């Protein structure tokens, strides 16, 4: 295989790890930022919405820019913005300052998220086989490293400003080292004639974006409520309850590391369909579990099922029209991100009407919708493709179910 292509894959891994590390470092320091600024939990919740809003805006801006100028130009700039913005929450001393910091960090995170995924689509296309899930797994690894580093520096009594400044230097160094490894490609010519199938693409893209919103909302439910579920519904002690999220996160990471060969064999449709079905069984098991070990097993199964789904949606959106890969990925990622933000707003009020575990039945429905809609990831038919369009990777054009 071409050495430059392997270098490009390594560079893409580096930017995914960088992004996961930056986000993880912020998450570890949320309590410290809350204490430094003196905001209440309620105010912090509103400020976190600004982070999500900034990320959504950044995603919508980065997609077209990546298509126009090439991801190899947008990714490094986004990485610099994302890295430098990490310092801001550490030095904020008031609610307005923290809000401005989080908007900036959100924009940096959103632009990097979409542009690096657009670049990953290009690398995957040239590889000729599915490799997208591994990139997302490395993002999780970056977050895990951030959790370890943040926990250690907090135990040493380091201030958030000091830790986040050092983390910024590390992130900038990673970005500088990885930038020369990125693939160069010709940007879309200004005024280029749209593809013949462009009229059909947006509808499929928005369906994929809707699926992403449901699945990422489901993922957010595990992030936000799994530990609380074991504590409040099953009376598990905190040390045991923590395993609910820990097992889910570990299953997500390991599952993503193992998904790409499965996609190459059975195709993305089968991975999303069966993964969503497994996730539905997992969250249903957790919801109805009579004891903590069964619930933990359910959350683990939930993570295994969800692990490979969202990366396939990003990949399918990018490959549908590679000249507009950035814009398409931004739609799927943006709506998916809104799904994560909507999770607390949906589950929280429902807990006033029913026990927390019964609200998870809504997630079962969401996964069921993904099962039914997975066929939208099928590659475009030959007549939909424009002349001269390179073929999609093998995992995206082979049969989507194993032959008996």
Image: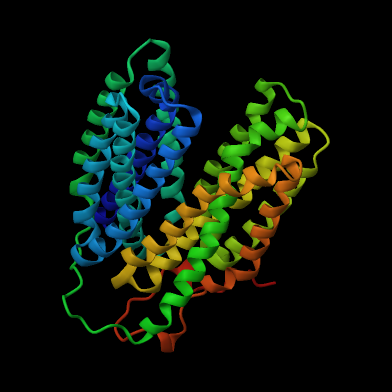
Residue 399 shows in this picture: yes
Q: In this figure, which colouring scheme has been used for the structure?
A: rainbow
**Residue at the location (26% across, 36% down)?**
85
Res. 362 image quadrant? bottom right
**Residue at the location (34% across, 48% down)?**
54
Percent coordinates x, y for residue 209 in the rendering:
48, 64
Residue 130 shows in this picture: no
Res. 333 image quadrant? bottom left
Report the front residue among 125 and 201.
201
Percent coordinates x, y for residue 395 in the rendering:
48, 66
Q: Quadrant of the N terminus?
A: bottom left
Q: Could you tell me how many numbered marks the image carries?
A: 0
Res. 17 image quadrant? top left
Report whether 170 appears left or right of 309. Answer: left
**Residue at the location (41% across, 38% down)?**
47
Instruction: Point out the residue furthest to the right here.
Output: 290
> With respect to residue 239, does 304 lie above or below?
below
Report the front residue among 293 and 42.
42
Report whether 216 appears left or right of 1. Answer: right
Report whether 61 appears left or right of 150. Answer: left
Percent coordinates x, y for residue 232 in the rendering:
73, 30
Q: Quadrant of the C terminus?
A: bottom right
Percent coordinates x, y for residue 179 in the rendering:
20, 46
Instruction: Point out the residue furthest to the top here.
Output: 156
> With respect to residue 321, does 351 lie above or below?
above
């Amino acid at each position: 295989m071409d050495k430059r292509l392997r270098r490009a894959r390594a560079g893409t891994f580096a930017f995914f790890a960088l992004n996961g590390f930056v986000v993880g470092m912020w998450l570890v320091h949320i309590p410290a930022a809350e204490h430094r600024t003196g905001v209440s939990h309620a105010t912090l919740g509103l400020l976190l919405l600004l982070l999500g809003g900034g990320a959504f805006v950044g995603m919508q801006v980065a997609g077209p820019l990546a298509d126009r100028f090439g991801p190899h130009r947008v990714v490094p700039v986004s990485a610099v913005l994302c890295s430098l913005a990490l310092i801001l929450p550490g030095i904020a001393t008031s609610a307005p300052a923290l809000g401005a910091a989080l908007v900036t960090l959100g924009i940096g995170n959103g632009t990097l998220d979409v542009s690096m995924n657009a670049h990953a689509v290009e690398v995957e296309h040239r590889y000729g086989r599915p490799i997208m899930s591994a990139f997302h797994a490395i993002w999780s690894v970056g977050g895990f490293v951030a959790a370890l580093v943040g926990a250690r520096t907090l135990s040493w009594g380091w201030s958030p400003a000091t830790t986040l400044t050092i983390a910024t230097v590390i992130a900038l160094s990673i970005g500088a080292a990885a930038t020369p490894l990125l693939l160069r490609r010709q940007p879309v010519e200004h005024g280029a004639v749209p593809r013949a199938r462009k009229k059909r693409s947006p509808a499929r893209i928005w369906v994929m974006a809707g699926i992403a919103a449901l699945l990422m909302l489901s993922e957010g439910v595990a992030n936000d409520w799994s530990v609380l579920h074991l504590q409040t519904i099953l009376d598990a002690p905190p040390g045991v309850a923590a395993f609910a999220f820990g097992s889910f996160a570990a299953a997500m990471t390991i599952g993503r590391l193992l998904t790409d060969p499965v996609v190459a064999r059975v195709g993305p449709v089968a991975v999303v369909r069966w993964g969503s079905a497994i996730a539905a069984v997992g969250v249903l098991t957790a919801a109805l579990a009579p004891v903590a070990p069964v619930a933990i097993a359910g959350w683990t199964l939930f993570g295994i099922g969800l692990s490979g789904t969202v990366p396939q949606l990003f990949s399918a959106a990018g490959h549908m029209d590679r000249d507009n890969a950035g814009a398409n990925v931004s739609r799927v990622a943006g709506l998916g991100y809104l799904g994560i933000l909507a999770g607390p707003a949906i589950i929280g009020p429902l807990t006033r009407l029913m026990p927390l575990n019964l609200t998870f039945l809504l997630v079962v429905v969401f996964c069921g919708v993904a099962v039914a809609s997975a066929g939208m990831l099928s590659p475009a038919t030959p007549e939909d493709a424009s002349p001269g369009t390179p073929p999609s990777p093998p995992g995206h054009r082979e049969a989507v179910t194993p032959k008996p």
